[in-house]
Amino acid sequence: MTYRIGPALLALTLSAVLLACGGHAGQTVTTPGARADLQDAALPPADAAEPFDLRRPSAVAETFPPQNPQAFYYGRYFYGAYAVQQGLAQRVTAAEEVAEFTPDWRGGAGEAAYAVFGCNMQYYEGSGTFNLEWDGDPPAAGNLYVGLGNFETNGWDWFTPDGTLTIDDPAPYISEIDFLLAAVVVLGDAPARLAGLRIGEEVVVEDVDLPMLFAPVLDWEIAVQADDFAARDPVARDFTVVEQANAGGFDYDIVSYTVDGLTIYGGVRLPAATEPGSCPVMLYGHCGAAGATIYGTTWLRSIIGDDELFDQFILLIAISRGEVLAGGSVQYWADGDIAYYDRDADDALALLDCVLANYPQADPERVCAVGWSRGAQVVTRAATRDPRITGVIAFALWTDEWSLDGQGSAYDALPQLTSEPTNRADMMYEYYHCLWELKNGDCAIWDMRQLMLHMSVAYSADDLPAIQLHAGSEDPLNAERHSGYLASWLSWYGHTDYRFWVYEDGTHDPSSYSGAGPRVRELLTEYVE
């Protein structure tokens, strides 16, 4: 089966994520030549306490987090970190780029080192060939076993590969939801470092290993991103009201403030109420990267369909560095280069600081955020970083650079990058410039993945407050599946306060989302009651 991504027609592969588990005595070693005592001697006994029990494949598959299929036959992945994240490793530790197996099994006693890989097989039509890639010497002959979860018998079939493992009929090993499980067991007492698991063929475009670039996000990468956000100082300084304007019958303050030494602008729509704490606050993120106007929320007013409700909010119109705010007597250009998906949330949070510190009528206990397209990404990212934002309404949201769309973008862009990108006004400048450096060997693949992670709010779902996700079934830019990716992660983390709607025939324009108004009003009403 093939799947079209933009103009490129790619064969698709599975992706894999490490989940380390244990063994279950009593499973049958079905492969000829495998050690008959493997289950009894090398792996924990059947009555071992969790998490050292290699449960039946159907149960193990349910423990994996959401995972994208990959658009490549070659599936090389750096594991290890997921074992630490899940807390299920036995003698397998994360060393960022490899998984270190340190078995202690000698003479039929001790502990094996083992882990289970879960693989998304959706769209895959490659060969049933598995290659374990070792960083250094592989385990000695007789000390390596690979178990495949058999979903027909709900048991494990064990193999003793010598370099390559070929499966003629993979059907029994693929679940109803296109999932495959492969357990790697190392015996003996010599450590081994597993660099990756290759399934099928290699795909390298412009010297970039695409499967490595799009390998599932690892726990240590998310931790690096969290440390980056924690080290930032998006506090607004030098707050000034530079102009007062009127648009649509409302008074607006056009304000300036500095973040990271750059002057940024924002619009503040002022309701009639002036009593301290009398007004809820709405942080607004605009579509695109051309900037915003102070009266550019008429589309949102139309969707809400309740002027009295909408007009009770202090409305914060956020722009980012490198963008323009219009609607006053002049256009106000923010300093700096556009910082798509990276520092834009810093600038929006700084505007929120300005309003809460300088407008007594703003209630810090009633702050929500609304955004469309890129603006939805900005305010959703801001909500993951600031608990003052207690509700988000996101229209046409892009959430995951590891999606098929993100993979297709990189696949298409690499051959077209024949010279270094120089247009810093392009909202995708950082992405394309980093991709250019990657293909020329001037950027580490992990640096590119960090930039992609900053562009992918799905992996921060656990930090989100209540959120509404609105998507159009015919959106050509941010397909409905992106809101679906985030919804999958929210469900995975056990969130219950989220809603996800797909609007039939809806496009990228939220005004085509028939029936969205009552749903939006339901959330906003919570801030005025």
Image: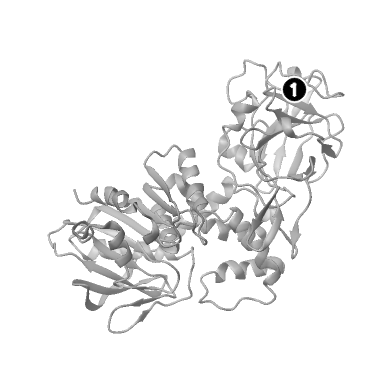
Q: Residue furthest bottom?
A: 330
Q: What's the residue type where badge 1 is placed?
A: Ala
Seen from the viewer's position, the closer of residues 115 and 259 is 115
- The residue at which mark 1 appears reads as 42
Residue 99 % position (x, y): 69, 41
**163 over 257 or under it: above or below:** above
Seen from the viewer's position, the closer of residues 49 and 181 is 181
Residue 314 % position (x, y): 23, 62
Label 1 packing within 10 angstroms: few (<14), some (14-19), many (20+): many
Q: Is residue 390 left or right of residue 211?
A: left
Identify the image's colour scheme: rainbow, by chain, secondary structure or one colour.
one colour
Residue 230 % position (x, y): 45, 55
Q: Which quadrant would residue 139 be assigned to in this image?
A: top right
Q: Residue at x 56, y 61 (%)?
A: 451
Q: Residue at x 74, y 50 (%)?
A: 73
Q: Residue at x 35, y 58 (%)?
A: 370
Residue 60 % position (x, y): 61, 29
Instruction: Note whether residue 386 is visible.
Output: no
Q: Residue at x 72, y 36 (%)?
A: 101
Seen from the viewer's position, the closer of residues 62 and 108 is 62
Q: Which quadrant would residue 158 be assigned to in this image?
A: top right
Q: Residue furthest front?
A: 505
